[in-house]
Image (cartoon, grey):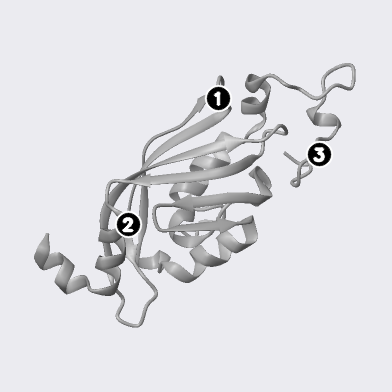
């Protein structure tokens, strides 16, 4: 992936034989480093833990201005997202398990991954997030970089917030 612009423009590597950008979704999907994405999801780019709980991801496969959203939050920009993840979970007490994928869909220029996550938040009372399943949808831009990351979860946003703020009360209700 070296030599590619992370902000939008392509490079010579992204161009067809006559200097034209590759427009085929198959070319875009082939350009993404699936091994890096799979590693990032489970153990992180440098082994600090799955990126959902550590922020440890391969920045070169994302646009700098990528949009990240889940049922409780939206982060605009890669650096903001990485910072937020680094503040949220304790990677030593948290985990991400890859259940399926990453699976490409060339027709829509998307990639899907199914995960199970759990962990301990870096709040003073160290609340634990019970295991939950999630699906992440990655959208690719014209250069084959991830420009949008959208998560859906098996738990509601209210349950996620409630178990964080009032863990004992929520566990008694469930």
Q: Residue furthest right?
A: 18
Element carrying mark 2 = helix
Q: Residue at x 68, y 22 (%)?
A: 27
Residue that badge 3 annotates: 9
> Please, is residue 156 above or below residue 144 in the view?
below
Q: Nearer the viewer, mark 3 or mark 2?
A: 2
> Please, is residue 46 above or below residue 37 in the view?
below
Give residue 136's position: percent from left, percent from top: 44, 41
Question: In screen coordinates, is 133 left or right of 34?
Answer: left
Residue that badge 1 annotates: 108
Question: Which residue occupies the foreground of this view, 2 or 128?
Answer: 128
Q: Residue at x 35, y 62 (%)?
A: 94
Q: Residue at x 57, y 61 (%)?
A: 82
Q: Residue furthest top?
A: 17
Q: Residue furthest bottom?
A: 124
* Mark with earlier residue (1, 2): 1
Give how far apart the Cα atoms at labels 1 and 2 are. Answer: 27 Å
Q: Are marks 3 and 2 in contact (CB under 8 Å)?
A: no
Question: Which residue occupies the foreground of this view, 94 or 14?
Answer: 14
Q: Residue furthest front?
A: 158
- The quadrant of the image that shows the N terminus is top right
Q: Residue at x 51, y 67 (%)?
A: 86
Residue that badge 2 annotates: 157
* Mark with earlier residue (1, 3): 3
């Amino acid at each position: 992936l070296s030599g590619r612009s992370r902000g939008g423009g392509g490079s010579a590597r992204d161009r067809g034989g006559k200097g034209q950008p590759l427009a085929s979704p198959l070319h875009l999907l082939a350009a993404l480093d699936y091994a890096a994405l799979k590693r990032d999801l489970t153990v992180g780019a440098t082994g600090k833990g799955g990126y959902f709980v550590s922020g440890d991801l391969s920045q070169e496969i994302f646009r700098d201005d990528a949009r990240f959203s889940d049922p409780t939050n939206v982060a605009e920009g890669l650096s903001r997202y990485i910072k937020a993840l680094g503040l949220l979970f304790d990677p030593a007490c948290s985990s991400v398990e890859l259940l399926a994928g990453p699976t490409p869909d060339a027709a829509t220029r998307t990639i899907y991954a199914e995960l199970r996550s759990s962990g301990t938040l870096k709040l003073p009372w160290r609340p634990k997030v019970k295991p939950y399943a999630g699906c992440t949808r990655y959208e690719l831009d014209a250069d084959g970089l991830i420009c949008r990351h959208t998560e859906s979860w098996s738990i509601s946003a209210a349950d996620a917030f409630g178990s964080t703020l009032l863990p004992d009360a929520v566990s008694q209700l469930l």
